[in-house]
Amino acid sequence: MTDNTMVNWGFIGAGGLATGTTAKSLHNSKNGKLYAAAARDANRARSLSPEVAYDSYEKLIQDPNVDAVYISLNNDAHLPWILKSLDAGKHVLCEKPMVMNAGDTVTAYAHAQEKGLLLVEAVWSLWHPRSQRVKELVAGGAIGSPTNYLGTFTFDEVTQGNYRLDPAMGGGALYDVGIYPLHGLVALLAEETEYRVTQASEEKHSERVDLTTKAQFSFEGTNAKGTGAIIASFAMHSSQRLVLKGTHGEISLPGDQAFTSHNQASELTITSNGVTTTESFAAVDPYQLMFENVSDATRGNGGWLPSPWQSIQVAKIVDQVFTLVQQPA
Ligand SMILES: NC(=O)c1ccc[n+]([C@@H]2O[C@H](COP(=O)([O-])OP(=O)(O)OC[C@H]3O[C@@H](n4cnc5c(N)ncnc54)[C@H](OP(=O)(O)O)[C@@H]3O)[C@@H](O)[C@H]2O)c1
């Protein structure tokens, strides 16, 4: 059964991302309405221009007119608000990292399934047409079987006092930016691929959160066997890289925004059996595409969504990295 009415979204949290970007993306979407917003300060919720502003997240999830919620809180608050929102009968789109470990990821998806509701991790780069094209090329065998991966996401601008520097609130570079290059690979390989982290190191900020994490891992599955490396940092110059080599070629994303290309034209370069070509992509807002796809999915109108197993695989790799860096040398 399909339903063509607009989806009423409720925003839980009105922080930097919601106020600077995602509220606008939803306002621009063709099938979703920013019906309600909740923040600890109702004036900040009002600044997103919803129809209804709340000073409490609880009030928002109890509003019967809200169909789906979008959670953009500090990372440690994601799981409790996912579970409460599902219990209140709302579909959930939750910012990355959806939760803090693989066990909680499984718990969250199981709860959504039990309630018959959607739960989606908002890894917005996955909705970019360039990311979809990379998937298509790899699945079609354009570079042969993947053998080597390098994914990096680094920048150096975290404000003192932000939750990103607080371990109790899910801070740290691996959670904040490291998950992008991990999703960048896991999205391309088969569900049953096994990942084994072989080396990991981190540099901490005042012994609190990781400012920089580097990890190396092996992967082996039906369509791939090889090694990969990621770098995530709050303490290096801004750049993002994705390079995937295979038995017959290589794909890379030119420019500095492999994972955050937003409202600007972008390209990918592919070498396949010795021939190198560049493909161009028009400027898009992947957040808007994300809201439109998730809105369609809540109505049973199609809509592309990443699979739960992808989030679970990424969370398992993150767990392995934390285990390795905590072991004495
Ligand atoms: N910034 C980005 O470019 C970006 C991109 C992609 C994903 N994300 C993800 O989006 C989420 C939010 O990021 P952000 O950049 O918007 O963060 P932020 O600007 O620091 O905002 C923090 C959010 O956390 C909430 N919060 C609740 N209790 C808090 C407390 N005690 N202290 C501080 N904040 C508290 C705030 O809620 P109230 O509004 O109620 O005050 C606010 O919505 C994170 O999961 C992040 O990984 C961010």
Image (cartoon, rainbow, N blue to C red):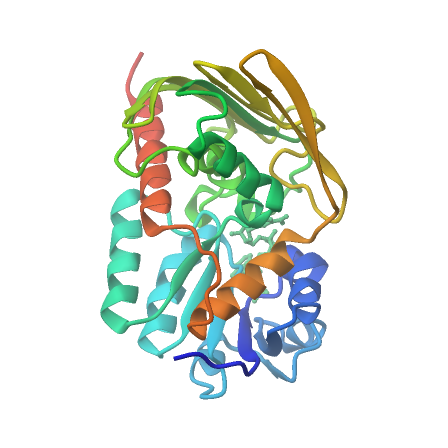
Q: Residue at x 42, y 72 (%)?
A: 300
Residue positioned most to the bottom: 64
Specify whether residue 92 is in view: yes
Residue 96, percent from left and from top: 48, 49
Residue 160, percent from left and from top: 64, 42
Q: Residue at x 40, y 75 (%)?
A: 90
Left or right of 127 in this view: 16? right
Specify whether residue 202 is in view: no
Q: Of 31 and 157, which appears nearest the observer?
A: 31
Q: Quadrant of residue 198?
A: top left
Q: Of 255 and 132, which appears nearest the observer?
A: 132
Left or right of 23 in this view: 220? left
Q: Of 47 and 226, which appears nearest the observer?
A: 226
Left or right of 321 in this view: 111? left
Q: Quadrant of residue 6?
A: bottom right
**Which quadrant of the figure shows ligand 1?**
bottom right
Q: Residue at x 71, y 65 (%)?
A: 24
Q: Of 193 and 229, which appears nearest the observer?
A: 193
Residue 69, percent from left and from top: 48, 71
Q: Residue at x 42, y 51 (%)?
A: 306
Quadrant placement of the N terminus: bottom left
Residue 329, percent from left and from top: 31, 11
Left or right of 122 in this view: 265? right
